[in-house]
Amino acid sequence: MHQRKSKKILIYFFLLIIVSSISNFTLNNFKLSKIQNINISGLEQKDNQILLNKIKDLKIENIFFINKKEIEKLINSNSLIEKYEVFKKYPSTININIEKTNFYARINQNSKTYLIGSNGKLTPAKDKNYDLPYIFGKPNIEEFLKFKRIIDKSEFSYDQIHSLYFFPSKRWDLKLKENILLKLPSKVTNENLDSLHVFLKNYNLKKFNVIDFRIKNKIILNE
């Protein structure tokens, strides 16, 4: 009886050694599964590299222990990014696919020119050659994006616009590339713009510089 117990103890002992060996081996391999590649696509090469360097500064050691919030915070702070997806490719690769924001207009803030993106963020205008409408005034960015959505729903083409003027009363004026200034009502709708578009299309207005549409059911022309 004593011998049987001794044999059982020996068997359990050897099993414990085997299990411990397997566990240690697995743990060692797990530690070796460090991130080897981080691939970023969607921005210009220079901007991809800048973002890559910032992510590397996070010192991510292992694909299994990525601090998702840190990466999201870093990506969301980039004004060039509209949308993104992060994929883990085991055992050691991270792929980040980015959709770049669209720039809609230029605006001056604190004596510096910025580009307004479709993501509602401002990007410093390093290149002065952007062919985008210029905004005069100090609108909230969301107010501008809301106004642009109204324009996009109308018959007007946003490409026709040279500049936009925003007033403290939250009213907008539009200056077209044909050098015509459109004075719009305070509560402009895409229906308003459609009516104005039809009027411009059906009449030769080259000698008029200002078209005042602020009074309901009236259009005032000024040279």
Image (cartoon, rainbow, N blue to C red):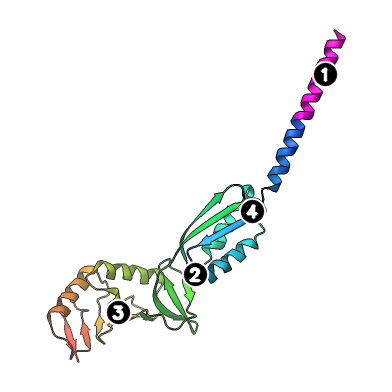
Nearer the camera: disc 1 or disc 2: 2
Left or right of residue 172, residue 216 in this image: left
Q: Is residue 216 left or right of residue 54?
A: left
State if disc 2 and disc 1 touch (CB < 8 Å). no
Residue flagged by tag 2: what amino acid is it?
Answer: Glu
Residue at mark 4 to residue at mark 3: CA–CA distance: 48 Å
Question: Dots 2 and 4: beta carbons under 8 Å?
Answer: no
User: Pointer 1 and pointer 3: residues touching (CB < 8 Å)?
Assistant: no
Q: Give the residue pinned by disc 2.
A: 44
Q: Residue at x 21, y 84 (%)?
A: 211
Q: Which residue is mark 3?
A: 161
Give amino acid for label 4. Answer: Ile
Lower sequence index among marks 4 and 3: 4
For disc 1, the neighbor class at 10 Å (few under 14, some 14 to 19, many from 20) is: few
- Where residue 160 is drawn, which disc sits there? none
Residue 82: x %, y % from top left? 45, 63
Mark 2 or mark 4: name the one nearer the start of the chain: 4
Three-letter code for the amino acid on which mark 1 is drawn: Ile
